[in-house]
Image (cartoon, helix red, strand yellow):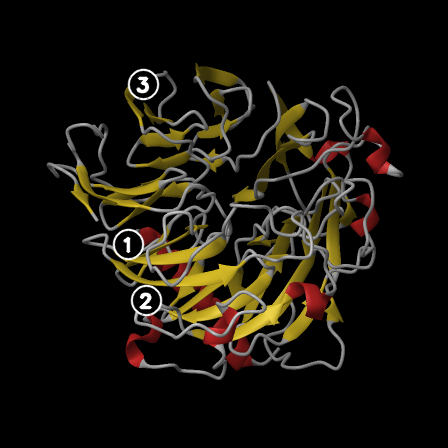
Amino acid sequence: MSIKQHLTRYLGFFLVCFATLRAEDQPQWGTAWNRNMISAETGLPAHFDPDTGTNIRWKVPLGTEAHSSPVVSGGHVFIGTNNHQPRDPKHQGDRGVLMCFDELTGELQWQLVVPKREEDRYFDWPRSGISSPATVEGDRVYVVTNRGEVVCLDAQGLSNGNQGPFMDEARHMTPQGSEPLELGDLDADILWMFDLTQEAGIWSHDGAHSSILINGPHLYLNTATGVDNTHKKIRTPNAPSLVVLDKETGTYLARENEGNAPNIFHCTWSAPAMTRVNGQETIWFAGGDGIVYGYDPIPFSIKAPDQPLHLNRVWRYDFDPTAPKEDVHRYNQNRREGPSNIFGMPVMDGDHMYIAGGGDLWWGKIGAWLKCITPSRDGDADQSSIKWTFPLERHVMSTPAVTDDLVFIADCGKNVFCLDKSNGKQLWQHSAKGEFWASPYVADGKVYIGSRRGDFMILAATREKQLLNEADLGAPVSATACAANGRLFVATMTALYCLEVESQGVNNL
């Protein structure tokens, strides 16, 4: 690697860290590269009231299902949803939607509207919308649509014209068999698009969920490849679970080559993370086969290989070594035994990785755990790599939040746990009325999290349990909260809230 490339890489790392320390925008799901669910924001509300509007700056309607977590960048808030409360009358029926709101007012700036895939509902589950969180860098927005397309969007929408090189937005936002709709002021500007199904050979299942990781000129993302509609077969056994694209052009640069697709129990929904180990940058990725992998990032100089490169694996850890490794789909709907899957992201803090996984929520065993692991770059890891293991009550969808001396995790047993980071011992447990799909989010000495029942809790991020506030938001919560610029953004399945201290009344748009 040249001196210039070294300087570019380390300058990029410094800028990411500096942005995190400033704690202004939150342009991706999770903090910086390590994906920790924390923020350095201060002055955030310890309570709010949906009925009186206390500490609520604005509230806006979404669709009827919003599984995407909000991100904030450049004065905009981006979040995925569906089209069951249309904002533009020309778009009718079930669609995936990415909405862009003004951060200060909640006014809708533009939206990406994507028709559903029609071959099989298991490719693009009805009403699930765009469930992937966006990742923003400068004036570019990267997201994976409900159709399994990686798109790069202009953060300004069409307000500054259709920038290209992609110019067929009208056709793209129109269902097959219909005349192309006319582009309007609320429509998105697609700069480029990469179809994971057609160009990478994946097999989408239920809903594409991916949070894109940016490393210099490259995008790293999980593909959401999975089983077919029988839930017993992998129709594309050579499909990649992790791919790398050029962020300027969408060119397909690299993929993992583990050959693990046949062992995916359900789908590949965990997004990659990145940190340094022994001074070397490493991509961390939890596969749908329950294995955690470490890879070398590809060189920045790679532009357009004849065939996608194979990522160099430097580490491998079997999260559930007693689980079956072959013919895994015979365990469908077995709640006692079977393979493990990992839905949340691996979080690196110092020399340790914190990761939660276990049986599949819909098809697998109940057992689940949060583990603290010491990863390396020395090939396969064994159980000596585990620093501690904490058993959860039921399935887990969350990514952990790791602070100075505490770890927070939520599970589908309706619990939020606070653990001692040094040894994994439980300090307290908060039992809720609904299961958790969202991740606990720690900022300003508080833990923010909402349940699938619609209760949103604010707890003190301390060694002793203290419930500061609980509010009924009236709709399930799948999304993780997000803090930026002194505000907290909270999404239910049907609405997005902007919380701010000393705001009075609700500006409903």
Q: Residues within 10 Å of mark 3 (few under 14, many from 20)?
A: some
Mark 1, secondary structure of its residue: loop
Residue highlighted by disc 1 = 24
Residue highlighted by disc 2 = 186
What's the distance in space between the residues labelled 1 and 3, CA to CA? 27 Å
Mark 3, secondary structure of its residue: strand
Residue shown at the point (32%, 17%) measured from the top left: 466
Residue highlighted by disc 3 = 467
Q: From the top left corner, tell me how far across and down residue 348 is, in percent.
A: 54, 44
In the image, what residue type sits under mark 2?
A: Leu
Picture layout, residue 165 above or below residue 11: below
Mark 1 or 3 closer to N-term?
1
Mark 2, secondary structure of its residue: loop
Q: Quadrant of residue 363?
A: top right
Q: From the top left corner, tell me how far across and down residue 86 is, in percent.
A: 36, 53
In the image, what residue type sits under mark 3?
A: Leu
Foreground pick, 155 / 420: 155
In the image, what residue type sits under mark 1?
A: Glu
